[in-house]
Amino acid sequence: MGALEAFVKAFDAIGVDAAGEPARLAQSRRQALEDLLRSGLPTRHTEDWKYTSLRALDAIDLATTAPTALLDREALRDAGALLVSDDPRLVFVDGAFDAELSHLNDLPPGVRLAPWGARQSSSDTEAGTVLDAAARGGAFEAINRLFARDGMALELADGVCLAAPVVVIALQTRGGASHLRHALRLGQGSSARVIEQHLGVVQVGPYLASCVTRAELARGARLQHVRLQDEADAAVHVSQLHAAQGEDSALDAQILVLGSRLSRQEIHIAHEAPGCHTDLRGASVLAGEQHGDVHMCIEHRHPRGTSRTDVRGVFDDAAHGVFTGRVTVHPGAQKTDAGMINRNLLLSPRAEADTRPQLQIDADDVLCSHGAAVGQLDAEALFYLQSRGIAAPLARALLVQAFVAQALPDIGWEPLRAQMRARLAARRGLEIEASEVWA
């Protein structure tokens, strides 16, 4: 049985009406099933999936009903979760909200933060809004809409600046599949920082984790969105961020990809008014036979928009990295200023990187550039460090971490900076004690 048939079977096992959901949600899921059956799963013949195969899904029991492990705060910390004092935190275990591990108290006025939990929802308003909150299109968006029954809903009133970051932790403890869907709405002049962390316990069997996040930024709003993806070795991870930006809004989206057998990170940005600014930055550090796919799309639809994209990859052993970046400047989007760069390091002769930065420009008064590079560590830089008494493995690790750090320079929150440093340093061959390259 193919993966598409397995998804349909898993949905049939749940039963769209047996779930006890409001009619609006049931209708949305029926529409998602129609969308999925119409599009089918992407293949290597699909242009945007040209270098990525989904054969890893064949090893996953997409309809599993294994029980969720009972976790406490220490077990969550041992799994690598970012736990900081009493800052806002939502924890989802195997796709379901865990109130005991979360912290949602003491929120300032004008901030609404809660899980939308379709299973517990007595009204279809919020759950239906979240379920329909991403742009339609694409098989995995439809899959997520078909199965997601929990996630975060964050809403900021006009002018509210949320000082503490919102941390969203998704942890997988069992094989099978889990799906989360988040919705962010920032009012005029508001600002927030949201950190998504995707983890899997070491001994867990094959699983699929999907996550779709929709962000709406009103005029002058500012959002920093950071995703740390460090799933278990047998995992397949697919995440999407869809953002619609209002006039003079600013979005800083960052990703760090470290784990899973197969990962796909998608970011889709639409400038819906003049003066929008977007920073897209990311890094993938993969080894073994891991496969990481980063897909970014920015739609400049109005004048005076700016965007910067800087994505880097480090691939060892037989790891394979893919980058597709597409900037579209629509007619009338004059004074657009867009730059895109993708750089990759291959640490092994078996490692591979495919990179496709693309520009489509339909306006004449613009400043746009793109580029890509694939290479090895600088032999002269290695020699220089070794000539100063630094052992070869440490010199190599220093250069790699410095290379990655250039793509993610402005984390802006010390606990997150330390966490990213620790997760990166835990990678084989990159161990550095008391490293200051991320300072």
Image: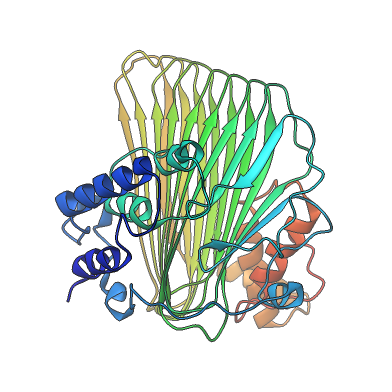
Query: x and y percent of residue 217 in the render?
Result: 56, 28
**Quarter of the rendering occupied by the C terminus:** bottom right
Rendered residue at 22%/58% (across/down): 42
| Residue 265 vertical position relative to residue 248 in the rendered view, above or below | below
**Quarter of the rendering occupied by the N terminus:** bottom left
Q: Quadrant of residue 230?
A: bottom right
Rendered residue at 73%/73% (across/down): 77
* Numbered disc total: 0
Q: Quadrant of residue 386?
A: bottom right
Residue sitting nearer the eye, 371 or 22: 22
| Residue 182 vertical position relative to residue 135 in the rendered view, above or below | below
| Residue 367 vertical position relative to residue 356 in the rendered view, above or below | above
Residue 383 visible? The answer is no
Residue sitting nearer the eye, 433 or 156: 156
Query: x and y percent of residue 169 in the render?
Result: 62, 61
Query: x and y percent of residue 282 in the render?
Result: 54, 52
Q: Is residue 400 left or right of residue 297?
A: right
Query: x and y percent of residue 135 in the render?
Result: 36, 37
Rendered residue at 45%/81% (across/down): 66
Q: Is residue 51 left or right of residue 81?
A: left
Rendered residue at 65%/65% (across/down): 401
